[in-house]
Image (tube, rainbow, N blue to C red):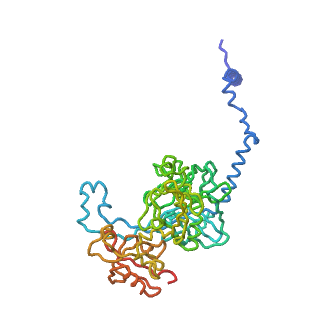
């Protein structure tokens, strides 16, 4: 007998089957939960670890709060310095030709085409600066604004202001610019002479164009010597820090824990050109007097003795009959220099200057460089174990290099058009590789921001004509520029890098 299952009975059996499957699945889940590893069960719903008790890390939190307060105080006084400048491309075809083509044609290929004249090229650069007074004086590096025809600063509130160059000092690599304003945020000077290795410092600036960056570190070392081989007269005494300094930080301040400027960041030492733990800042013992002079006079003239010096060390002290390894030993005396006139000799150890002990050669270099030409200083000198006092009357640094024909200091010379001049000499002609039949006046100096600077003139250029008239000497140029009517421009024919170009000197403002 067949059993027939009705539709209703089929539905009843289906419900029973689903219920059985559900019960089986639930049983399997319960079995898995009971058998799974403890680690798997702990990952679900385990409470997060509690934060450290504030009393345990209170010192760190207090430090963070102090750093935040310090950064908030200083940052409004930091500016981004954007510079537009003119530079000249080298005129020699050899220097412009790709290396692979030079190898194919040979190094003398360019001479068959003759000199090529190039107008000054426009370049853009950025750096940093710090506002030091509410009326808008800003300190930066000379290398940031060198050759600038336009300077603009961006404040931390994104406001952009046009800045004017007040003065620059290439020797110390410092410059002062100014913006119009009142009640601007500023930060005070600190005393770099009381810094000690290990102290906390912060570096502010605009590295790689990332504006208003702050980095923290310590004073790694003090009184680092001048590492630049291009000019031994540049003072050292740099502050070394591990607070990160990168391209774009130049001109920004190094600040102590009180929010005071103790240095101006200026360079780093790295095999890659990027920060590697060694940044350097100019100490305020050099910065402040230089800045004060630039604001007052627009330029700095450094005192000069005419000697070469090095440190007295434990290794060499006995050879100079001195008891301790301090002071500066004279290694060279220039003929007819202030030092020579005062009777200084090679091997003398300078122990004191105006009653103040000289710690090392860098210390002496800074102290003398900050004295004005014409000042008489008193040196305590140890010679062969005997102490003597010698007065030295300082001259202006580089005065011998400029010679007596620097007519640019006259009313219509450097201060008016922005150039310092000298006559052509056989030595200068050879150095510049100028043709024998070329006559004119050699540019010795170009004042930053001047008419000559804006025209792209540079040291070593030779002025051949003024207003389409030949000139033979520096006095000819002085006379020709002096005869230019007030408010009128002048045109110069200038020999530079093997070729002649015309340059327009625009009438200075207020002339």
User: Residue at the location (48% across, 57% down)?
Assistant: 348
Res 79 seen here: no
- Measured as percent of width and height from the top left, residue 200 is found at 64, 50
- In the orientation shown, which residue stands out farthest toward the top? 1
- Image: 312 above or below 380: above
> Which of the 4 image quadrants contains residue 73?
bottom right
> Which of the 4 image quadrants contains residue 453?
bottom left
- In the orientation shown, which residue stands out farthest toward the front? 386
Res 258 seen here: yes
- Measured as percent of width and height from the top left, residue 221 is found at 57, 50
- Measured as percent of width and height from the top left, residue 450 is found at 47, 75
Q: Nearer the viewer, residue 430 or 249?
A: 430
Q: Is residue 286 left or right of residue 1?
A: left
Q: Nearer the viewer, residue 155 or 241?
A: 241
- Image: 15 above or below 446: above
Q: Nearer the viewer, residue 485 or 31?
A: 485
Q: Is residue 5 left or right of residue 401?
A: right
- Measured as percent of width and height from the top left, residue 52 is found at 73, 39
Which quarter shows the N terminus?
top right
Q: Is residue 216 left or right of residue 62?
A: left
What is the tally of numbered marks visible in this picture? Answer: 0
- Image: 244 above or below 128: above
> Which of the 4 image quadrants contains residue 439?
bottom left
């Amino acid at each position: 007998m067949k059993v027939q299952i009705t539709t209703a009975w089929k539905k009843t059996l289906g419900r029973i089957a689903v219920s059985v499957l559900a019960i089986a699945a639930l049983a399997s889940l319960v079995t898995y939960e009971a058998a799974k590893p403890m680690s798997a069960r702990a990952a679900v719903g385990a409470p997060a670890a509690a934060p450290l008790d504030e009393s345990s890390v209170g010192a760190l939190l207090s430090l963070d709060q102090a750093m935040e307060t310090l950064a908030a105080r200083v940052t409004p006084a930091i500016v981004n310095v954007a510079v537009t400048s003119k530079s000249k491309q080298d005129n020699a075809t050899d220097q412009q030709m790709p290396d692979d083509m030079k190898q194919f044609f040979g190094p003398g290929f360019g001479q068959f085409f003759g000199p090529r004249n190039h107008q000054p090229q426009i370049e853009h650069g950025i750096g940093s600066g710090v506002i030091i007074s509410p009326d808008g004086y800003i300190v930066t590096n000379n290398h940031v604004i060198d050759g600038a025809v336009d300077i603009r600063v961006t404040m931390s509130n994104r406001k952009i202001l046009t800045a004017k160059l007040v003065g620059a000092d290439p020797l110390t690599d410092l410059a002062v610019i100014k913006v119009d304003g009142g009640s601007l945020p500023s930060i005070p000077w600190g005393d770099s002479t009381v810094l000690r290795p290990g102290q906390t410092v912060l570096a502010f600036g605009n590295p790689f164009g990332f504006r208003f960056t702050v980095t923290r570190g310590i004073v790694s070392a003090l009184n680092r010597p001048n590492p630049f081989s291009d000019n031994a007269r540049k003072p050292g005494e740099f502050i070394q820090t591990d607070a990160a300094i990168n391209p774009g930080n130049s001109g920004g301040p190094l600040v102590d824990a009180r929010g005071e400027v103790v240095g101006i960041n200026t360079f780093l030492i790295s095999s890659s050109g990027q920060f590697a733990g060694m940044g350097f800042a100019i100490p305020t013992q050099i910065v402040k007097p230089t800045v004060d002079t630039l604001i007052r006079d627009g330029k700095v003239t450094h005192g000069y003795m005419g000697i070469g010096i090095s440190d007295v060390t434990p290794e060499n002290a006995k050879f100079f009959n001195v008891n301790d390894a301090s002071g500066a030993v004279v290694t060279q005396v220039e003929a007819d220099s202030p030092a020579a006139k005062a009777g200084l000799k090679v091997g003398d150890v300078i122990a004191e200057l105006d009653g103040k002990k000289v710690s090392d050669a860098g210390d002496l270099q800074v102290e003398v460089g900050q004295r004005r030409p014409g000042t008489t200083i008193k040196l305590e000198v140890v010679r062969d174990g005997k102490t003597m006092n010698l007065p030295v009357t300082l001259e202006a640094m580089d005065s011998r290099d400029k010679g007596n024909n620097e007519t640019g200091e006259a009313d219509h010379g450097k201060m008016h058009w922005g150039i310092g001049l000298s006559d052509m000499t056989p030595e200068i002609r050879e150095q510049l590789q100028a043709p024998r039949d070329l006559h004119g006046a050699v540019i010795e100096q170009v004042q930053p921001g001047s008419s000559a600077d804006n025209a792209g003139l540079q040291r070593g250029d030779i002025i051949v004509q003024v207003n389409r008239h030949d000139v033979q000497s520096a006095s000819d140029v002085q006379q020709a520029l002096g005869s230019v009517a007030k408010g009128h421009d002048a045109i110069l024919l200038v020999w530079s890098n093997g070729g002649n170009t015309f340059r327009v000197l625009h009438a200075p403002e207020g002339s």
